[in-house]
Image (cartoon, rainbow, N blue to C red):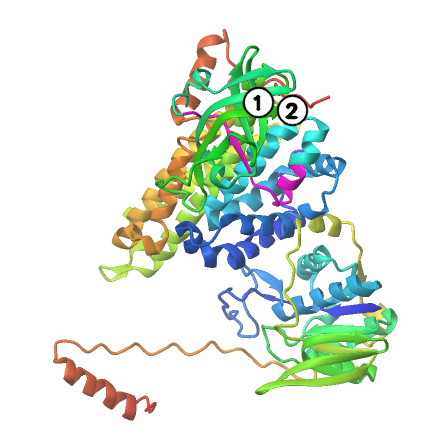
Amino acid sequence: MFSLKITEEQRIAREMSRKFCAKEITPKADALEKGEEKIFPVIRKFLLEVQGTGLIETVEDLEEWVQGREFITRNLVSIEVSKALPGFALSMGASLELCSFSILATGSREQQEKYVLPLVHGEKVGCWGLTEPEAGSDIRAMKSTYKKTPDGYILNGQKTFITNAPIADIFVVYAQGEKGYSAFILERGMTGLDTSPPFEKMGMQSSPTGAIYMDQIKVPKENLLGQEGQGLFDAFRVLTNERTVTPSLMIGIMERALQEATKYAKERVQFGKPIIRFQAVQFLLARIWEKLLASYSMLFTLGQMTELGLDTTLLASAAKLFTSEAATQSALDAIQVMGGHGYMREAGVERLARDAKLMEIGAGASQIQLMILGRKLLESDSVEPNPLFFGPSLFAKKE
Amino acid sequence: MKVLVCMKQTPDTEASIKIAADGKGIEEQNIKWIMSPYDEYAVEEAIRIKEKQTGETVVVTVGTDRVVESMRTALAMGIDRGVHCVDPAFLGSDALATAKILASVIKTENPDVVLCGRQAIDLDQAQAPAYLAEILGWPQVYSVAKLELKGNAAVCNRRIEGGEEIVETSLPCVMTCDKGLNEPRYASLPGIMKAKKKEIKKWALAQTGLAETDVGTAGAKVKTLGYLPLPDRPPGKVFKEMETADMVKQVVKLLREEAKVI
């Protein structure tokens, strides 16, 4: 069963993703980064024309689609997208891998039909709100509250650093109430729901990030997502998914960094020869490739474990930690190879470093991933270090 | 309406082509192969015709096993099935020999319309469609930028110098597709998975009804003697350490006398 042999279908899928990026994203990348062009129409085109989500008409189709998505193909496609523009991959991920995923994981059939279908078609934009001004890594400190009323809930509070918040139509947010932490689905237009304009930030500029304001929002009963009180457990599951999809985003950045720097090193002549002939430069490039290959290995292992139904939480943490740090370092090394040219915005490599840095922070900062691994060592009498011997997934298939 | 597309696999437009050591071909390893871009218009048009008025679409390719991936891409875009003409005897076919092989498939398939790309982007010969029409005794319309099927006829807009020409032809016919005819779709992921199950029939010399001397190197009327790389560009001249006005004089002089461009 275990084979990483690339199939014809996977090859074609990668090619199509590449083709889409070359035609639809790369020529607009600068305009998208500067906000002169909007990201979501392009994402929508990608979903409909490359992912073929237009064929998903019912919840049954949706289930079939989710089951049929094969790990390697999915990742090959995402890597190409990230290579072209990481911010594109980020915004699409927030809508599908966070917002949609959370509703697919614990939502009712009605919720899936109402919210997930338009999200996968790219008709609606989704975002997922967990972080608050005073609750980042310490998520239990969240101040957003919900109160039960006869016909639903009243939500109050604020979320921040939320990808897609300024443009979102559908919001999944977490709040604290009598029974603990719970998740709710909000829709733009609900009285009391507002968002900030996009924040100015270091990187990922094509992907709008902002705050969600909740002021006495009346949320109907049917918009409770999952079981009341189970919110944080459910959020943890979404975070594990996010950490599982992060490596492809980071691999895209590393591949691009390696390609750009290698091309430059072959063209740039100093001391009478292309600088790639100097070991000092070769070593910088080789270090990027080393990290890239290690990232691929982690990704493949994650894929195999996911398909085997093994618990991926620890490896997902480690992979998210490793690949995000590796991507930032690789992008910085690529700039170093390219010298002054690499430092210039025009070369497009400094953007990779700014983009990569986000993933050392989002989806749980690197230090949180280290704590997850560290605590496991602390709390278990004897730890199984080999991922292939890990137990079954905590999130076994929904009945 | 049954539409048959003749497709060729070519090196990627961005591939850097190196001539093989024997000078008789190109180095085929490490090259990315794609469906010739003009053939993509043909594939897209065939799919659109079927979407509009039902029927069947078939893609036909002559080539080694390597070409199956491009055929599969056409199937993933939406073509119904494929015929892969593959036989050691086909190797070295020129455009005429290739057209004979394609015609043998077309005679069996009996389509209403045969669509080809305007030319393959590797050898730029644009010969096979014309040969094909001749062998079949069908009309041929070259370089179609707009196509409308009306019953048993087709009205085509052709790109010509400075404008367009509108022609009408009876069916069946051979048409070659030009840029602007349509915007080829991407093969979607579900399309790619569906294509896996679509049939690609093999078509060898025995099925063509042709003799071994009709095809391949033996049947080629035009023999390729060799390939030459483009000559290296001479290094540029740099003028420095003189007044700008003098530099300009020098450059203009050389442009006039040496390069003879002004």
Q: Where on the picture, by quarter, is residue B247?
A: bottom left
Q: Looking at numbered disc 2 in the image, what kind of residue is underneath it?
A: Thr
Residue B255 seen anywhere in this rendered image of the structure: yes
Q: In this image, A233 relative to A356: left or right?
A: right
| In the image, farthest residue toward the top | A381
On the image, numbered disc 2 is attached to which residue?
A106
The residue nearer to you, when weighing A16 against A196, is A196
The residue nearer to you, when weighing B102 against A325, is A325
SS for callout 1: strand
Q: Chain of mark 2?
A: A
In the rendered view of the protein, which quadrant contains the N terminus of chain B?
Answer: bottom right
The residue nearer to you, when weighing A356 against B97, is A356
Location of residue B147 with respect to B254 vertically, above or below: above
On the image, numbered disc 1 is attached to which residue?
A183
The residue drawn where x is 69% and y is 63% is B64
Q: Looking at numbered disc 1 in the image, what kind of residue is underneath it?
A: Ala
SS for callout 2: helix
Distance from label 1 to label 2 (Cα)?
10 Å
Asked if labels 2 and 1 touch by Cβ distance under 8 angstroms, the answer is yes
Residue B8 seen anywhere in this rendered image of the structure: no
Residue B32: x percent and y percent? Answer: 56, 60
Q: Give, as a single range, the part of the protein colored magenta.
A: A116-132
The residue drawn where x is 63% and y is 17% is A227
The residue drawn where x is 68% and y is 61% is B67
